[in-house]
Amino acid sequence: MQDLPERTARNIRKGERGLTLKAFFIAMLLIPLNVFWIIQLEVVRYTHPTLIHPLSNVIFIIFWLMVFSALLGKLSSKLRLTPAELLTIYVMLCIVSSLCSHDMMEILVTILGHPFRFATFENEWQQLFWKELPTWLTVQDTSVLSGYYEGQSTLYRKAHLTAWALPIVWWTLFILVLMFVMLCINTLLRIQWTERERLTYPIIQLPLAMTETNTSFFKNKLMWLGFSIAAAISILNLLNSIYPAVPYLPVKRQNIHQYFTGRPWNAMGGVRLSFYPFAIGISFLIPLDLLFSCWAFYWVYKFELMAGSVLGIRNLPGFPYADAQSFGAYMVLLATAGWVGRTHVKRIFTGVVEGLRGTGTSRIDMQREPMPYHIAFLGIVGGMLFLTVFSYKAGMSLWVIPIFFGLYFLLATMIARLRAELGFLVHDLHRVDPHGLIVTAFGTQRLTTSTKAVFSLYMFFNRAYRAHPMPQELEALKISERRQIRPQHTAAAILIATLVGAIVIFWLLLDSYYRHGAETGYYGPWALGFGRGVYRQLENWLNYPQGTDIPALAFMGGGVGVAFGLMVLRTRFLWWPLHPLGYAMANSWGMSNLWSCLFVAWIAKAIVLHQGGLKAYRQMVPFFLGLALGDYISGSLWSIGSILANTTLYQFWP
């Protein structure tokens, strides 16, 4: 008779197969279509679906995939996609969408040839940094670049393919290793955040509800009521974009700072109001104290700006150093999470040691993970070794490399935590990045020119973090746990999507640029803007050296102190309503655009909980998910209409 542990391990291994041949081939067909759609929206028309979560384009694709699956299932049950297959396709499309984003590979392609096309006698780029840019990571042949920028050409010439091949291979490998290291980190963190702390993961609730086996979500009348309200608003605004005489319902962001012209109110800067149905719908799932903290600290930040004006300290460059304060707060939050999970850290250490020794006493737990802990540990070590060699060969100083990637993965882990706990739709962290923090701490004079040149090349995954892939991976593992999908299948799906997605993104972006030309005006402002911004920053670093930014470091310490104080108050007083996450995000681009949506969601959730308690809240969740789904489906239809008609129709975001 088999002992209980062995039978338990076997039952765990029997999780549903997500990455079936059927799911794989459907994903392979959908990835190029999804990438083409994103390029048309973000690069050509300058609308950005990948900056909000859950990703509207992926929700739209999964919705219609479910419809077709149901229709084909009537012909044969073998043609119907299982929830595990649907969610695996969802994960793969989310990974690819994050890579093909305004904050990732859309940047990478535009910076590889920019300094060699736009070097002039005046900017002196050739003398300043041409020789510091590695030939194996950039495209330096101006004859190859002329077709890219001028258009009326084709990628499929031998000279063009040869020039781009080597950088594409190396950057694809770099991205794959980066994603693998994140997957290894998520493997080590998953069980603590998902099963022990039971973080809420608001972002994945919509795809989980849509793919329920009993389809109760689509039978819920409240869901269809929310769907209808959002769709009606979207249809009305679509008609307004076609026939201006039709009234417009102002749900999209609009500036109201023109009403604050007197002192000290004018010191607040821009203030925006928005009432996006999808944002209100998803935000309803955020814990009540976090909702309150977010919009409350947004206004604390605005009053901080006014106080600086009144006290006359706005003349201090960078005041109030909000980004430095945010970084300090994020590090406190991450340290707190590490302290709460210190027992789990010991288990990780034990699992790694046992795995390396081959004793395997924690084998049963390992069946629930994408990979054993010792494999994840070795993956992190091996991945960091690759990134170190890659960066050193590219020109980064050896002492800078561990600091750079240490900060990057700390920030990535914090963003994953933020999404799992808060579930805010946008997490940008503009100007909170490794190279910026290193320049703040050490200045530019201590950094070699080649190090700063590599910083510029690495801007493609460090400009902003709105589409960061690490939380997508963590949420994929949570989905696999909730729907009992084999985690090994989920991990394989992530890595396959990364490899295939990176190649497809390079292909479709380059194909489009060679046909239409990056500088012909066919594209939105960032076809050239990314390269211009990246290399002007490098030019400024070289021409105007700066030292350590002492005030920024002081405010960073202040951020640590404030966040620590808030955390202590939360542990001492259960009624304390302010969470340090709200303080950390107060000045972010996302909070600037969506604070009023959080305010509406906070009011709605507070009323529901006060009047009906947890039961009423659960009953209302489908209504708010329906708001998001209705906005996503109708808005995505209008975006497809814009592409087909080659005109600008109503875009539900931004």
Image: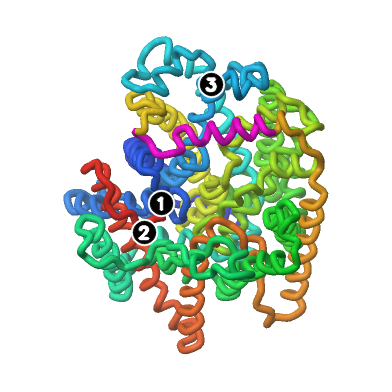
Q: Where is mark 2, residue-wise?
A: 211
Residue at mark 1 = 87
Is residue 500 within the magenta segment? no
Q: Residue furthest left?
A: 75
Element type where label 2 sits in the image: loop
Q: Quadrant of residue 252?
A: bottom left
Asked whether residue 11 appears in the rendered view, the answer is no
Q: How is the image coloured?
A: rainbow
Nearest the viewer among 158 and 149 is 149
Which quadrant of the rendered structure holds the C terminus? Answer: bottom left
Q: Who is closer to the viewer here, 559 or 620?
A: 559
Q: Residue furthest top?
A: 158
Q: Residue at x 51, y 87 (%)?
A: 610
Q: CA distance from mark 3 to mark 2?
A: 40 Å
Q: Is residue 361 toward the left or the right of residue 88 in the image? A: right
Residue position marked by numbered label 3 in the rendering:
167
Q: Secondary structure at mark 3?
A: helix
For badge 2, the amino acid type reads Thr
Under mark 1, the amino acid is Leu
Q: Are marks 2 and 1 in contact (CB under 8 Å)?
A: yes
Of callouts 2 and 1, which one flags the residue occurring earlier in the amino acid sequence? 1
Q: Dot 1: within a 10 Å radius of its alpha carbon, few (fewer than 14), some, or many (20 or more) residues? A: many
Q: Which residues are magenta?
A: 522-540
Between the C-alphas of marks 3 and 1, the distance is 33 Å
Rendered location of residue 418, percent (x, y): 60, 58
Which circle's residue, 3 or 2, is located before the other in the chain?
3
